Image (tube, rainbow, N blue to C red):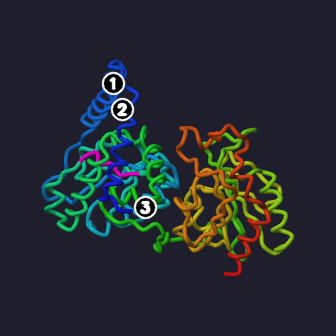
Amino acid sequence: MNWNEAETELSLKEWQQILDWRGRDSRLVRISFAWSRWKKHFWNRFKWRMRRQGAPAAGAPIRILFWLPGGMGDACCAKRLVAAYRSLLPDAVFEIYTPLSGVAKMLFGGEKNTHILERENFSPLDYDLALQACMAVKFLYVNPLRLRRAAPAFAAVLERAQKAQKSLGSLLEDLFLTEGLLGRWLYRQGGRRFDLLSYTGGIALPHDVEQGLPVTDVSRKKFGLSDTDYITFHDGTSHAQNVGKDRPTRAWPAECWREFLRLLKKEFPHIQLVQLGGKNSPVYEEADLCLVGRTAVEELPSIMAGALGHVDTESGLVHLAQFLPVRSVVIFGPSDSSFLGYAKNENLVGGDCGGCMWITKDWMLRCPLGNSPAPCMQCVTAPEVLAAVKRILTS
């Protein structure tokens, strides 16, 4: 994606204007928005100053904070940024915080000069560089002098990132508010998941990676999977979602899952079906081994790495599998395969409807067109998923 094209720059300007249209004819609305932004900025700065322990000393190693506020999938995507920065800052101390500490330990634990923060009690002002990273990168604090002196190779990255973040203006003011707008804009421009992360991070990031996570067979032994042929599958829901009558829009219909599992078991009776998932995932009796709610996050790489394949909808486990020697069959609906899909996987899309991610704030829970269940997910059939699994098994 060419960020310097006039068309791209004009499109960004247009979307920045969208944020201001609501208050164009109302002074009260404009004042309210300005007050909200100022209050949030003031409160953050106040908290950071109160928590501040002190900036790094002149001769101390470079310290960088990565604040990853998203879920497992977002943290897996941000791992590319962490690895890219590490290649230019080999001796820097990286401190990583995510609300899901188990995810941080799984992805970054044991890496050189890397510490996992358990609580959000840090101050970005204590670092040479503090940033938030999800769909985009936002620098919270920068000490450019120390960074340029200690890591000249990083200077160009820093300059590009600051210029890119400045160009986004109000679109980057509050990532929690505007991430969806940025994501939708990138999708409409024909971009991919890592284009915006690369642009605002100032460094090229690959969409498909070759680096892997270190895994052992400890978890496979724990669950009796060491000497067994098995396929893992995941319903696509997470522990943060309440799965009831109305399933999340990215979830494949339960009856489709049951039909697929029966078909797979009939054709490959020697292959065990291992179900993964959080505590809110529905349990399928067709599974030979149900690990729903029974695994720690850190155990997932070992289990998935030993599988013949993984079947899922677009979820955090699919992004995790990108770092493991396993291919996935992924069923796409509201989220778009050209935007989020990986080349090594079998990415299945059914019907013309779909790709509605970020159109509404609750698009992951309710179809923007009011349909229940989401018709895009119903279009992918169990025989199609079985055929994709066969292609993985014979490749």
Q: What stretch is highlighted in magenta?
A: 136-141
* Residue at numbered disc 3: 79
Closest to the observer: 63 or 246?
246
Above or below — where is 258 with respect to 36? below
Spot occupied by residue 299 in the image (x, y as percentages of width and height): 59, 62
Q: Which residue is at the far right?
A: 266
Q: Which residue is drawn at 79% across and 66% down?
A: 383
Q: Residue at x 14, y 59 (%)?
A: 59
Q: Which of marks 2 and 1 is nearer the N terminus?
A: 2
Contact, mark 2 vs mark 1 (Cβ under 8 Å) = yes
Q: Earlier in the sequence, mark 1 or mark 3?
A: 1
Dot 1 amino acid type: Arg
Q: Is there any visible trace of residue 94 in the rendered image?
A: no
Q: Which residue is at the far bottom?
A: 395
Mark 1 secondary-structure assignment: helix
* Residue at numbered disc 2: 20
Q: How far apart are marks 1 and 3 (CA)?
A: 38 Å
Tally of numbered discs: 3
Query: Which dot marks residue 30?
Result: 1
Above or below — where is 187 with respect to 301? above
Spot occupied by residue 108 in the image (x, y as percentages of width and height): 43, 61
